[in-house]
Image (cartoon, helix red, strand yellow):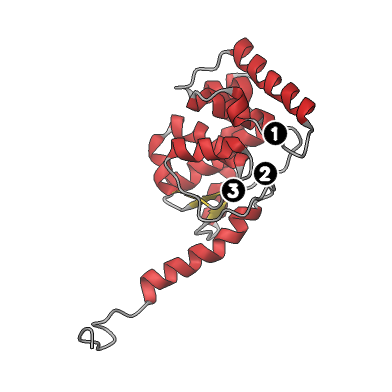
Amino acid sequence: MSRAQAEAAIEAGARLVMDAIDGGADFVATGDMGIGNTTAASAITAAVTGAAAEDVTGHGTGVDDAGWRRKVDAVRRALAVNRPDPGDGLDVLAKVGGFEIGGLVGVILGGAARRVPVALDGFIAGAAALVAATIAPACVHALFASHRSAEPGHARALAWLGLAPYLDLGLRLGEGTGAALFVHLARAATRLYAEMATFKSAGVDGPA
């Protein structure tokens, strides 16, 4: 895509999440639905983190070993031909990303700008977060890694972002599945922090 198209994709995602926040949303959960976008996510992850294509490319929807080798080769060729600048997230998105990933970048940046927590889902959302973090590094402080995908590139992305996943269920799903599971954990943690009695409030002096 062109740089202008990449910008438009990000702006569309940002408008979407800001409208939701203006409507009362206080927590954002990401997700994706697409075919072939683990290839784009692998290319983004390799570009930003500097990892080798074979180390961040998985079997996706279940391709066999021959299909995996073709997928790795496609990632290598995309990087060699397009030469994305790892320090320029917009350049990476435009050259090896996808429009749905651009939308997620906007969701992440928009949520972070409004100081609303953003739960990342799996590999695709993780790749979007890599792009977002090169554009606005401080956005990482708003991010929570809901789970670790079985895709090998996801662990690399989370390590680069400095995020630890809260769940590890071997999921290969997108669609926000891991983020949806994490919502309840996040709500419970918030209530424990805000509402749980302390020894002092409960009238407990100390150990018996």
Q: Residue at x 61, y 40 (%)?
A: 123
Residue nearer the viewer, 71 or 130: 71
The reply to whether dot 1 and dot 2 touch (C-beta < 8 Å) is: yes
Q: Residue at x 49, y 62 (%)?
A: 186
Instruction: Please state the horizontal and vertical placement of residue 76, each as a whole percent of the image.
Output: 64, 17
Q: Regarding mark 1 in the picture, which secondary structure is present there? A: helix
Instruction: Please state the horizontal and vertical placement of residue 38, each as a whole percent of the image.
Output: 68, 34
The reply to whether dot 1 and dot 3 touch (C-beta < 8 Å) is: no
Q: CA distance from mark 3 to mark 2?
A: 8 Å
Image quadrant in which you'd find residue 106: top right
Q: Which residue is mark 1?
A: 37
Q: Regarding mark 3 in the picture, which secondary structure is present there? A: loop
Q: Which residue is mark 3?
A: 121
| Label whose residue precedes the other's in the sequence (1 or 2) | 2
| Label whose residue precedes the other's in the sequence (1 or 3) | 1
Other-residue count near label 3 (Cα within 10 Å), few / some / many at <14 / 14–19 / ≥20: many
Other-residue count near label 2 (Cα within 10 Å), few / some / many at <14 / 14–19 / ≥20: many
Residue 6 in sight: no
Q: CA distance from mark 1 to mark 2?
A: 9 Å
Residue nearer the viewer, 112 or 158: 158
Q: Amino acid at mark 2?
A: Asp
Q: Number of labelled discs?
A: 3
Q: Which residue is mark 2?
A: 32
**Location of the C terminus (image quadrant):** bottom left
Q: Residue at x 53, y 61 (%)?
A: 24
Residue 183 vertical placement versus 206 (above, below) = above
Q: Regarding mark 2 in the picture, which secondary structure is present there? A: loop
The reply to whether dot 3 and dot 2 touch (C-beta < 8 Å) is: yes
Q: Residue furthest front?
A: 65
Q: Amino acid at mark 3?
A: Asp
Q: Amino acid at mark 1?
A: Asn
